[in-house]
Amino acid sequence: MIFTQFSRGRDWLSWAVLAGLLAICGTAMRDVAMRPVRTVDRLGHADLLDWLSGRDLRGEFTTTKLRLARRLAEDLRQGYDWQQDLAALDRPRRELCAANARELVRVWLLERAERYAALTEPDRTAFVDEQLDDVLYWPVWQRRGSRDLAGLMPRNPALAVEQLDAWTGELQEHDRQRIHQFTGALYLRWLQRGIQFLPSGV
Protein backbone atom coordinates (compact mmCIF):
# COMPACT_ATOMS: atom_id res chain seq x y z
CA MET A 1 0.00 0.00 0.00
CA ILE A 2 2.77 2.41 0.96
CA PHE A 3 4.72 1.38 -2.15
CA THR A 4 1.67 2.03 -4.35
CA GLN A 5 1.20 5.50 -2.87
CA PHE A 6 4.90 6.22 -3.31
CA SER A 7 4.72 5.07 -6.94
CA ARG A 8 1.70 7.27 -7.62
CA GLY A 9 3.43 10.22 -5.99
CA ARG A 10 6.51 9.65 -8.10
CA ASP A 11 4.39 9.44 -11.26
CA TRP A 12 2.62 12.67 -10.33
CA LEU A 13 5.97 14.37 -9.71
CA SER A 14 7.29 13.16 -13.05
CA TRP A 15 4.25 14.56 -14.85
CA ALA A 16 4.62 17.87 -13.02
CA VAL A 17 8.30 18.11 -14.01
CA LEU A 18 7.44 17.22 -17.63
CA ALA A 19 4.70 19.86 -17.73
CA GLY A 20 7.10 22.42 -16.32
CA LEU A 21 9.74 21.60 -18.93
CA LEU A 22 7.18 21.82 -21.72
CA ALA A 23 6.04 25.22 -20.46
CA ILE A 24 9.63 26.47 -20.38
CA CYS A 25 10.27 25.16 -23.91
CA GLY A 26 7.05 26.73 -25.16
CA THR A 27 7.99 30.10 -23.69
CA ALA A 28 11.46 29.91 -25.22
CA MET A 29 10.10 28.98 -28.65
CA ARG A 30 7.53 31.78 -28.51
CA ASP A 31 10.29 34.24 -27.59
CA VAL A 32 12.40 33.11 -30.54
CA ALA A 33 9.41 33.37 -32.88
CA MET A 34 8.52 36.87 -31.67
CA ARG A 35 12.07 38.23 -31.78
CA PRO A 36 11.97 39.04 -35.54
CA VAL A 37 8.60 40.74 -35.02
CA ARG A 38 10.03 43.01 -32.32
CA THR A 39 13.01 43.72 -34.57
CA VAL A 40 10.74 44.76 -37.45
CA ASP A 41 9.03 47.40 -35.33
CA ARG A 42 12.40 49.13 -34.78
CA LEU A 43 13.64 49.08 -38.38
CA GLY A 44 14.69 52.42 -39.84
CA HIS A 45 14.43 53.13 -43.56
CA ALA A 46 17.93 51.84 -44.38
CA ASP A 47 17.43 48.74 -42.23
CA LEU A 48 14.08 48.03 -43.90
CA LEU A 49 15.73 48.29 -47.32
CA ASP A 50 18.43 45.85 -46.17
CA TRP A 51 15.78 43.40 -44.95
CA LEU A 52 13.80 43.50 -48.19
CA SER A 53 16.84 43.32 -50.48
CA GLY A 54 18.94 40.89 -48.45
CA ARG A 55 16.71 38.02 -47.33
CA ASP A 56 13.95 35.89 -48.80
CA LEU A 57 10.81 36.64 -46.78
CA ARG A 58 8.75 33.71 -48.02
CA GLY A 59 9.91 31.58 -45.12
CA GLU A 60 9.12 34.16 -42.44
CA PHE A 61 6.15 33.84 -40.11
CA THR A 62 2.97 35.49 -41.39
CA THR A 63 2.99 37.73 -38.31
CA THR A 64 6.45 39.00 -39.24
CA LYS A 65 5.44 39.61 -42.85
CA LEU A 66 2.37 41.56 -41.76
CA ARG A 67 4.51 43.73 -39.50
CA LEU A 68 6.93 44.28 -42.39
CA ALA A 69 4.05 45.20 -44.71
CA ARG A 70 2.79 47.76 -42.22
CA ARG A 71 6.31 49.06 -41.69
CA LEU A 72 6.75 49.45 -45.46
CA ALA A 73 3.43 51.30 -45.71
CA GLU A 74 4.55 53.62 -42.92
CA ASP A 75 7.81 54.23 -44.77
CA LEU A 76 5.91 55.23 -47.93
CA ARG A 77 3.57 57.34 -45.82
CA GLN A 78 6.63 59.23 -44.55
CA GLY A 79 7.70 59.97 -48.13
CA TYR A 80 10.85 57.90 -48.60
CA ASP A 81 11.89 57.53 -52.25
CA TRP A 82 12.03 53.80 -52.90
CA GLN A 83 12.48 54.29 -56.66
CA GLN A 84 15.84 55.92 -56.02
CA ASP A 85 16.78 53.22 -53.51
CA LEU A 86 15.90 50.41 -55.91
CA ALA A 87 17.88 52.05 -58.72
CA ALA A 88 20.97 52.09 -56.48
CA LEU A 89 20.87 48.32 -55.85
CA ASP A 90 22.54 45.71 -58.01
CA ARG A 91 20.22 43.54 -60.07
CA PRO A 92 19.96 40.48 -57.75
CA ARG A 93 19.16 42.63 -54.70
CA ARG A 94 16.71 44.76 -56.68
CA GLU A 95 14.88 41.66 -57.93
CA LEU A 96 14.79 40.16 -54.44
CA CYS A 97 13.43 43.42 -53.03
CA ALA A 98 10.69 43.49 -55.68
CA ALA A 99 9.80 39.84 -55.00
CA ASN A 100 9.65 40.51 -51.26
CA ALA A 101 7.47 43.56 -51.83
CA ARG A 102 5.05 41.43 -53.85
CA GLU A 103 4.98 38.86 -51.04
CA LEU A 104 4.21 41.57 -48.49
CA VAL A 105 1.47 42.97 -50.72
CA ARG A 106 -0.12 39.51 -50.95
CA VAL A 107 -0.05 39.06 -47.18
CA TRP A 108 -1.37 42.59 -46.55
CA LEU A 109 -4.13 42.21 -49.15
CA LEU A 110 -5.27 38.88 -47.72
CA GLU A 111 -5.41 40.31 -44.21
CA ARG A 112 -7.41 43.33 -45.42
CA ALA A 113 -9.66 41.15 -47.58
CA GLU A 114 -10.49 38.92 -44.62
CA ARG A 115 -11.33 41.95 -42.50
CA TYR A 116 -13.51 43.31 -45.31
CA ALA A 117 -15.34 40.00 -45.73
CA ALA A 118 -16.15 39.89 -42.02
CA LEU A 119 -17.90 43.30 -42.16
CA THR A 120 -21.42 44.22 -43.21
CA GLU A 121 -22.68 47.35 -44.93
CA PRO A 122 -22.20 50.22 -44.24
CA ASP A 123 -19.09 49.16 -42.30
CA ARG A 124 -17.56 47.80 -45.51
CA THR A 125 -17.88 51.17 -47.24
CA ALA A 126 -16.30 52.95 -44.30
CA PHE A 127 -13.47 50.42 -44.25
CA VAL A 128 -12.78 50.83 -47.98
CA ASP A 129 -12.86 54.62 -47.65
CA GLU A 130 -10.31 54.38 -44.85
CA GLN A 131 -7.94 52.35 -47.04
CA LEU A 132 -8.32 54.75 -49.97
CA ASP A 133 -7.84 57.87 -47.86
CA ASP A 134 -4.68 56.43 -46.36
CA VAL A 135 -2.96 55.37 -49.58
CA LEU A 136 -3.98 58.38 -51.67
CA TYR A 137 -2.14 60.84 -49.46
CA TRP A 138 1.19 59.07 -49.45
CA PRO A 139 3.77 61.65 -50.65
CA VAL A 140 5.06 59.21 -53.27
CA TRP A 141 1.96 59.94 -55.38
CA GLN A 142 2.74 63.66 -55.37
CA ARG A 143 6.06 63.38 -57.20
CA ARG A 144 6.05 64.84 -60.66
CA GLY A 145 7.01 62.40 -63.37
CA SER A 146 6.29 59.38 -61.15
CA ARG A 147 4.40 56.75 -63.12
CA ASP A 148 4.14 54.13 -60.38
CA LEU A 149 4.45 53.46 -56.69
CA ALA A 150 8.06 52.79 -55.69
CA GLY A 151 8.75 51.30 -59.11
CA LEU A 152 6.22 48.52 -58.48
CA MET A 153 2.59 49.61 -58.72
CA PRO A 154 1.02 51.47 -61.70
CA ARG A 155 -0.54 54.84 -60.91
CA ASN A 156 -3.58 53.98 -63.01
CA PRO A 157 -6.13 52.31 -60.69
CA ALA A 158 -7.43 49.84 -63.28
CA LEU A 159 -3.89 48.74 -64.12
CA ALA A 160 -3.07 48.56 -60.42
CA VAL A 161 -5.95 46.14 -59.80
CA GLU A 162 -4.74 44.00 -62.71
CA GLN A 163 -1.25 43.99 -61.23
CA LEU A 164 -2.55 42.94 -57.83
CA ASP A 165 -4.55 40.13 -59.43
CA ALA A 166 -1.40 38.89 -61.15
CA TRP A 167 0.53 38.93 -57.87
CA THR A 168 -2.09 36.80 -56.14
CA GLY A 169 -2.07 34.09 -58.82
CA GLU A 170 -0.19 31.62 -56.59
CA LEU A 171 -2.69 31.79 -53.74
CA GLN A 172 -5.44 29.27 -53.12
CA GLU A 173 -8.71 29.92 -54.95
CA HIS A 174 -10.59 30.87 -51.76
CA ASP A 175 -7.96 33.47 -50.87
CA ARG A 176 -7.90 34.81 -54.42
CA GLN A 177 -11.66 35.25 -54.40
CA ARG A 178 -11.48 37.17 -51.12
CA ILE A 179 -8.81 39.47 -52.53
CA HIS A 180 -10.69 39.99 -55.80
CA GLN A 181 -13.77 40.96 -53.81
CA PHE A 182 -11.77 43.49 -51.80
CA THR A 183 -9.82 45.01 -54.71
CA GLY A 184 -13.03 45.18 -56.73
CA ALA A 185 -14.67 47.08 -53.87
CA LEU A 186 -11.71 49.46 -53.75
CA TYR A 187 -11.93 50.19 -57.47
CA LEU A 188 -15.72 50.58 -57.44
CA ARG A 189 -15.55 52.96 -54.48
CA TRP A 190 -12.83 54.91 -56.29
CA LEU A 191 -15.18 55.42 -59.22
CA GLN A 192 -18.17 56.25 -56.97
CA ARG A 193 -16.22 58.96 -55.20
CA GLY A 194 -15.05 60.44 -58.49
CA ILE A 195 -11.44 60.51 -57.36
CA GLN A 196 -9.15 61.74 -60.09
CA PHE A 197 -5.88 59.85 -60.16
CA LEU A 198 -2.97 62.14 -59.39
CA PRO A 199 -1.39 63.34 -62.65
CA SER A 200 2.14 62.20 -63.35
CA GLY A 201 3.19 65.70 -64.33
CA VAL A 202 5.61 65.09 -67.19
Image (cartoon, helix red, strand yellow):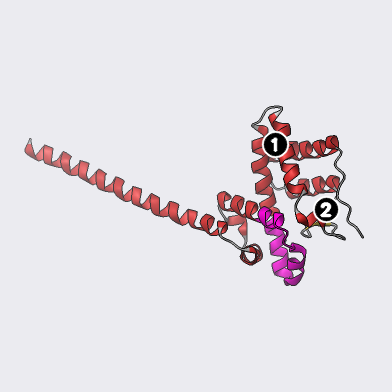
- For badge 1, the amino acid type reads Phe
Is 21 covered by the magenta stretch? no
Give the image location of residue 42, x and y in percent: 56, 60
Residue at 64%, 32% (x, y): give it. 118
The percent coordinates of residue 55 (x first, y second) are 61, 64
Quadrant in the picture for residue 186:
top right
Seen in the picture, residue 86 relative to 63 is either above or below; the reply is: below
- State the SS at label 1: helix
- Where residue 20 appears, x then y in whole percent? 29, 48
Dot 2 crowding, Cα within 10 Å, few <14, some 14–19, many 20+: some
Examine the structure image and report whether residue 93 is included in the region drawn in magenta. yes
**Any mark on residue 154, and which?**
2
Residue named by callout 1: 127
Closer to us: 147 or 58? 147
- Most extreme residue toward the right, as rendered? 202
- Name which residue lies at 57% across and 58% down: 40
Which residue is rendered at x = 73% and y = 37% of the image?
A: 128
- Identity of the amino acid at label 2? Pro
Badge 2 marks a residue whose secondary structure is strand
Q: Are marks 2 and 1 in contact (CB under 8 Å)?
A: no
User: Is tag 2's residue or tag 1's residue first in the polypeptide sequence?
Assistant: 1
Q: In this view, does 201 lie above or below 13?
A: below
Alpha-carbon neighbours of circle 1 within 10 Å: few (<14), some, or many (≥20)? some
Residue 10 visible in this rendered orientation of the protein: yes
Q: In which quarter of the image is residue 192?
A: top right
